[in-house]
Image (tube, helix red, strand yellow):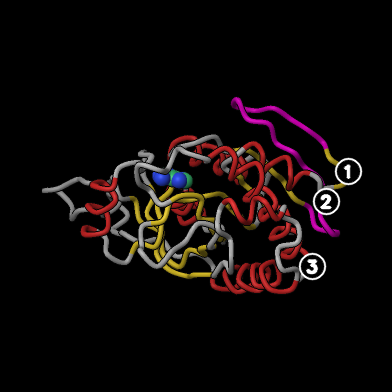
Amino acid sequence: ERVVGIIGAMHEEINSILQLMTDVKESSYGMRTYYTGIINGVNTVLVFSRWGKVAAATTVTSLIVKFNITELIFIGVAGAISHQLRIGDIVIAERLVQHDMDARPIMERYEIPLLGVTYFEPDTKLVAIAEKAIHATLDNQNQAFIDQDKKDEFLLTSPEVYKGTIASGDQFFAKQVDKDTLLSNLPDSLCVEMEGASVAQVCYEYGVPFVVIRIISDESNENSAINFADFIINVSSKYSHEIIKNIFLL
Ligand code: ADE
């Protein structure tokens, strides 16, 4: 039986996605609240992962072993690393790397010990579905679900969709120098966040297909913390709602 796990990395995103679910039941486990229910006829389990690799890895493990999910959607915000990206753009992971994994000289830098893997790859079918759902969200509705003053505040003129590499690690990027270092070490990184590649590792180990979707909330520099909460409450949680809704319509 198909059961779709949905992890959000922000409370506000969970609340907005929860509006899509019917027959909701709540259960608590390991300091997480799991919402089981139905979105457009499909069994789903929604949970707030909290932040960081351990929080996300343990949450997805619970989804797999306790809630028997058969696929996973992770949605959240990320800081831009590539200079092409603007606030409000959306990234779908094609590869995920743990930028803080470094077991040199025993392993190559970034290699996950004992897996012999550096990059984890999401499921291509889920990526294709996410891409369609995001285009539907951005194009057809002209982002009418976001207040005009917030579009102006965050300069959301015409958000773009990117597919590529996401770097994850236990660090919030708020200094230009750290951003520059990451970009020179992992030059194909589109954006940085704190969960995706750990979720990807667990899904890889359990053989569960997954996709990671990230809305760019900041530029991973000294301005990152400014307006962060405001962006999540007014912009990214609305995107999350629409994107998840569209995924289940496809
Ligand atoms: N998630 C959103 N913005 C981020 C940043 N600047 N660094 C790490 N994770 C993030």
- Residue type indicated by callout 2: Ile
Question: Badge 3 local density, few (<14 within 10 Å), some, or many (20+)?
Answer: few
Q: Which residue is mark 3?
A: 249
Residue 94 appearing in the image:
yes
Which mark identifies residue 181? none
- Using the image as rendered, state which of residue 20 and residue 27 is in the foreground: 20
Specify start and end residues of the magenta stretch as a single range: 25-43
* Quadrant of the image occupied by residue 96: bottom left
The alpha-carbon separation of the residues under discs 3 and 1 comes to: 18 Å
Q: Earlier in the sequence, mark 3 or mark 1?
A: 1
Decide if residue 211 is on the left or right side of residue 43. left
Figure disc tally: 3
Which residue appears farthest toward the right when viewing the image?
23
- Residue type indicated by callout 1: Asp
Which mark identifies residue 38? 2
- Residue type indicated by callout 3: Leu
Q: Secondary structure at mark 3?
A: helix
On the image, the x and y values in percent for residue 166 come to 41, 58
Q: Secondary structure at mark 2?
A: strand
Q: Earlier in the sequence, mark 2 or mark 1?
A: 1
Q: Is residue 228 above or below residue 95?
A: above
> Do the numbered discs 2 and 1 sit on residues whose CB atoms are within 8 Å?
yes
Which mark identifies residue 23? 1
